[in-house]
Amino acid sequence: MKIDNLLQSIKSKEWLKKHVGYFDGDLYSLTDSGFETTEIKSKVMIVSRKHYVESWKTYPSITASELKEILKLQKQTDNKVIKHVYSKNVQQEGFDVKTIEFSQQIAEQFPENVLIPEVELISRYYQQQTVAVQISTPSGELLYATSEGKAHSAYKRGLVSSLRVFAFSIGLSEQSQQITLDQTQYSQLLWQVIKSYPLTQLDKLIYFDVKKSINLPILHAVYWAPLISALLFTGVVGGYYYLYDLSLDEQLSENRQQVNELLQKKQSIDKSRNYVVGASTELTKYRSVLSDFQIAQEAIKAGMDIQQFKGDENGVSLRGFADSASSVLQTMSDLPELASAEFNGPVRKSGTRDYFIMQLVLVDTDEK
């Protein structure tokens, strides 16, 4: 159970929250109620937009490996604190590269910290969405929007007097979605992105100078055992999650087969039901021939000796004898299959019995 609790704690990343801070000239910690000032310099610092500069450049007709070599050379020849973020440009058959250059104050004050540009977190949260967002930050009102796959940001000041003006300036239409966030919502957004960000993709988000932060010779000489232990632990955790993912995949595969079988059965049932409903609808359009004989049988039960029976689309005609013609007529009038029942001509006496012709009109199918 202790191992499971430890793994759950690592997976939830709640332990990381106390190591994450925000810097805009002052230090802040992230809380559910917003930004709180602090004197503690966290290991992971989210850097305010006012402390770095963004620039875009397109490298056409180039492969990913070639681009990495070019960016690597640029970092080696430039002493500035620079991070590159690139994305595929299909039209140019190359890449769009965003260069993030941190200010000298950041380079001097946080040489050994993990740095995260705040706009990268916002961009991650609203990825694949065409939105314009006005965010209340400790540094002021930050405006953010995406256009043609590129993230743009600026502070609300001077000519950029509103979110609407900013959205128009980068080519967004008036119908584009506009969102406003206060500091509480923004603090929660930043932590939510960090918490949900895949560890395997952290290199795309953070800036970290390994050479300045870690003395590699001393590390190799002194910390072999802890390093190996950490690697073993990472391997065990990775293996555990790998096996766990495999078991989940197997369960999902089994459930998927069951779901497919249920869907096929449902489709078969729906097809049969539609057939029955369609057939029933068609059958109700036609009057059953058998009902005519049932009507004749009712007349016989009422005491009529039928000599002649005629039936057509409009009704049935019965000719014959009965002890009481009116009794037979009354019985036939009560039948729900008949719209009307009446004598066709006078009722004559033949000995002690009545001789008569009775005309019966059937109920129309639509009336039923």
Image (cartoon, rainbow, N blue to C red):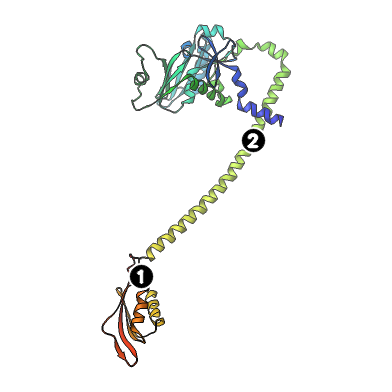
- Image quarter where the C terminus lies is bottom left
* Kind of element beneath mark 2: helix
The reply to whether residue 66 is visible in this rendering is no
Residue 44 visible (yes or no): yes
Residue 5 falls left or right of residue 71: right
Residue at 46% in and 20% down:
182
Up-down: is 262 above or below 54? Answer: below
Tell me the SS state at disc 1: loop
Say if mark 1 contacts mark 2, CB within 8 Å: no
Quadrant holding the N terminus: top right
Q: Of label 1 and label 2, which has the lower sequence position?
A: 2
Estimate the x, y position of residue 91 in percent, counting from the top left: 40, 26
- The residue that label 1 is drawn on is 287
* Disc 1 packing (10 Å; few <14; some 14–19; many ≥20): some
* In the displayed structure image, the side of residue 247 where residue 353 appears, left or right: left
Q: Who's the residue at 34% across and 21% down the image?
A: 168
| Residue lying furthest left | 345
Q: Nearer the viewer, residue 16 or 339?
A: 339
Q: Compared to 170, does 299 lie above or below? A: below
Task: Identify the residue at image location x=72%, y=19%.
Answer: 226
CA gap, disc 1 and disc 2: 66 Å
Where is residue 58 shown, x and y percent of the image?
42, 19
Q: Nearer the viewer, mark 1 or mark 2?
A: 1
Q: Callout 2 environment at 10 Å: few (<14), some (14 to 19), or many (20+)?
A: few
The numbered dot on residue 244 is 2
Q: Amino acid at mark 1?
A: Arg
Task: Report the amino acid beneath label 2.
Answer: Tyr
- Between residues 56 and 339, which one lies in front from this camera angle? 339
